Each structure stands twice: as C-alpha cells, then as structure tokens.
Image: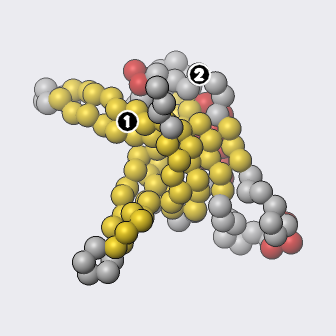
Amino acid sequence: MLNRIILIGRLTRDPELRYVPSGQPVAGFTLAVDRPFVNQQGERATDFIDVVAWRRLAEQVTQHLSKGRLVAVEGRLQIRSYETQDGQKRKVAEVVADAVRFLDRKAGAATAAVTPGAPAPEMEAEAGDGDGDDVPF
C-alpha cells in the first residue's frame, strides 16, 4: 500500500505553532493549490488543503514560512474523525508533511545570497510523526 502526496502551492496564512499535551510541537497551515484545468469561464479552480507538520519541521515552517510563500509539501493523507461539543461527528482530511521545500525567496532577501540554479532549502521531519490523538485543531 502507498499513501504519498506531493503538493505545490502558496500558503494562505502564516503557520500556527501549537504544543500538544505531550509537549510535541505541531504546526498547521493551509496551502492553495490550483487545479490543472480551467472551467467553462476560462478560470482555474483552487483547492485549499490543510497541512500539519510535527516536531522540528513544525518549528522550522513556523520560523521560515509566511502567507503567500510558494512551497512544495511531501507527505501523506490522513483522515481523522472527531466529535464536536454538541455531539456531531466530523471528519477532517489533512496532509501530514514529511518534507517542505521553499520554491521562492523570502521577501526582502538579498539576491546575492541565492545562487541561480541552486536547490531550494529543504526541511525534513523526524521519523515517527505524531498520531492524530494529540492534534489540537
């Protein structure tokens, strides 16, 4: 079996860093990803996909990413269920990130610091991303 997802898109908001009761950092952000086709009006539809990063990767994305940044996210799809305070059952689909690559330069960064053609910085998650039981959102 295989559960791998690779997405390229822009952050719709700054990542939010939180800590689960066990003390592990977890960051959440939403990625806007254009669909590869246009509708009858000639417009592209966009999907807004929730992404979760754990541990060191969570801290790194919070420090280095912000709204509007273009990134590639590699990870796995996770579907989890929960019950609201009023007893309704809900399902959430999200991507649990294993790696995030910057695909653009940070606004205001010196152009001399980036070598044309050089690979973009990459952040790798530690093995054993947390389970869905501690997710605070």
Q: Describe the element under mark 1 as helix, strand or loop.
A: loop
Q: Nearer the viewer, residue 120 or 5?
A: 5
Residue under the point 46% across and 22% down: 131
Q: Which of marks 1 and 2 is nearer the N terminus?
A: 2
From this view, report whether residue 62 is shown above or below residue 39: above
What amino acid type is highlighted by mark number 2? Gly
Residue 96: x and y in percent read: 49, 36
**Mark 1 residue crowding within 10 angstroms, few (<14) / some (14–19) / many (20+):** few
Give the numbered dot on residue 128: 2
Residue under the point 86% across and 72% down: 112
Residue under the point 51% across and 60% down: 9
Looking at the image, residue 95 sits to the left or right of residue 46; the answer is right
Give the numbered dot on residue 9: none
Residue highlighted by disc 1: 137
Residue 135: x and y in percent read: 42, 29
In the rendered image, the residue lying farthest to the front is: 1
Q: How far apart are marks 1 and 2 (CA)?
A: 19 Å
From this view, report whether residue 116 is shown above or below residue 74: below
Asked whether residue 13 appears in the rendered view, the answer is no
Asked whether residue 9 appears in the rendered view, the answer is yes
Q: Which of 128 and 41 is in front in this view?
A: 41
Residue 21: x and y in percent read: 47, 21
What amino acid type is highlighted by mark number 1? Phe
For the C terminus, which image quadrant? Answer: top left
In the image, which is nearer the foreground, mark 1 or mark 2?
Answer: 2
Quarter of the rendering containing residue 119:
bottom right
